[in-house]
Image (tube, helix red, strand yellow):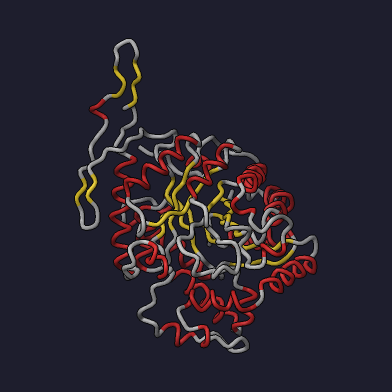
Amino acid sequence: MEIILTATVMGLGMHHGSWRYRDGDAFDYVDPDYYAHIARTAEAGALHAIFLADTLDVSEERFARPNLGALDPAVTLAVMAAHTERIGLVGTSSTTFNEPFNLARRFASLDHMSRGRAGWNAVTTFVPAVAGNFGGTPLPAHDQRYARAREFLDVVIGLWESWEAGATVGDKATGTFVDAARVHALDHVGEHFSVRGPSTLPRSRQGRPVIFQAGASESGRDLAAQYADVVFTAQNTIEAATAFRTDVRRRAVGHGRPADALKIVPGLLPVVGSTTAEAQARKEELDELRGVGPELEKLALRVGVPVEALELDEPLPVDLIRANDGFRGSHGFRDAAVELATRRNLTVRELLYANGGGHQQVVGTPEEIADTIETWVEAGAVDGFNLMIDAFPSGLEDVVEHVVPLLRKRCLFHNEYAGSTLRTNLGLPPLP
């Protein structure tokens, strides 16, 4: 089985200490050359896509490090598109704090400008402070956000499909520019949106951007099963990952889709060293530069308890976490942290070390990281991994130079891209 590998770009690295650890300026994350280098490096390793996070408020980081998604993803990906030819370009954008027509146009434009390499990661946004930047009304409840997201996706997909294949004619002899019979108004009127359509843009080389989605709650899983091509998830154990993949594929069948119509790609944070000791030294230096405070505050936010409730050398207060009926954060991150802590009987301090920003973390040699990937693949737990790079560019360079060749030797990863579009390279079925 050949797996999917994507790489997430979050500021200067996923680890809170990355900006102090790495060479280079602390504000490289607003430099176009920084993103061009990352894109070229990832494409040299034939990774399937670059995946950009998005941040709409500084509250979660409290200015403790470079904002993880400060730049608009679509604009940044357009820069990366100009420096690459084959790698996919996936950007995160919120269904809670956008309008579907503008978003559909933005990502369709990226899809055309990249010749069919664009993807959209649809998120509902779980950070309450974001609402203060969009009118000041409180962040909607979890179920309300997902109800809006479902209608949002219906509208966006409807706009992308409002031009049929063959609508673009361009016959200079007859003066026929477009076959108007193959371009359709959407005329959508729903609870949240009223959108006439059609799209201002025709279909792209891959038909439309690939849809990524990340959600682990009941609503999130069902949304993914109905709409997503690729599901990004936080899973820290093989058992939980296998159960998640089985459940989402079952739900897809319930929506009239083949079980293999969508790919499940959990996050994986590799910390690479030529020896295990070297990898551990890298991780320990990153942790020391970060300090405990910022990660403890982030963990408290992600699991929905006051930071004072987290005692470093005591177990995670699981009962308190589960009693929070008003939790509005990411169910996926919360559940993954609880699963990891309880299954391994970790203290809060141990969880902070092992929990790679909410994702599975492997600290070790290229062989040890490849072993972990192979084990999860053979267990049927995943279709690939979204690599959460600890510090750029060295963390990505280590993966491309040392881990990817091992995966190829084990026949787990392709040697070159299968085609020119993201949909083809991911092994997704063509659109009708």
Q: From this view, report whether residue 299 is shown above or below residue 431.
A: below
In the image, 214: left or right of 313? left
Frontmost residue, 419 versus 59:
59
**How far across and how far down the image is residue 352, in percent?**
61, 76
- Can residue 414 be seen here? The reply is no
Number of marks present in the image shown:
0
In the image, 232: left or right of 143? right
Q: Quadrant of the C terminus?
A: top left
**How far across and how far down the image is residue 262, in percent?**
44, 52
Residue extending furthest toward the top: 173
Q: From this view, report whether residue 52 is shown above or below residue 421.
A: below
Frontmost residue, 407 versus 179:
179
Residue 223 appears in which quarter of the rendering? bottom left
- Can residue 315 be seen here? The reply is yes
Residue at horizontal 24%, vertical 46%? Answer: 195
**How far across and how far down the image is residue 47, in percent?**
61, 47
Residue at horizontal 42%, vertical 69%? Answer: 129
Q: From this view, report whether residue 241 is shown above or below residue 340.
A: above
In the image, 60: left or right of 223? right
Q: From this view, report whether residue 375 is shown above or below residue 109.
A: below
Frontmost residue, 95 versus 380:
95
**How far across and how far down the image is residue 260, in percent?**
44, 51
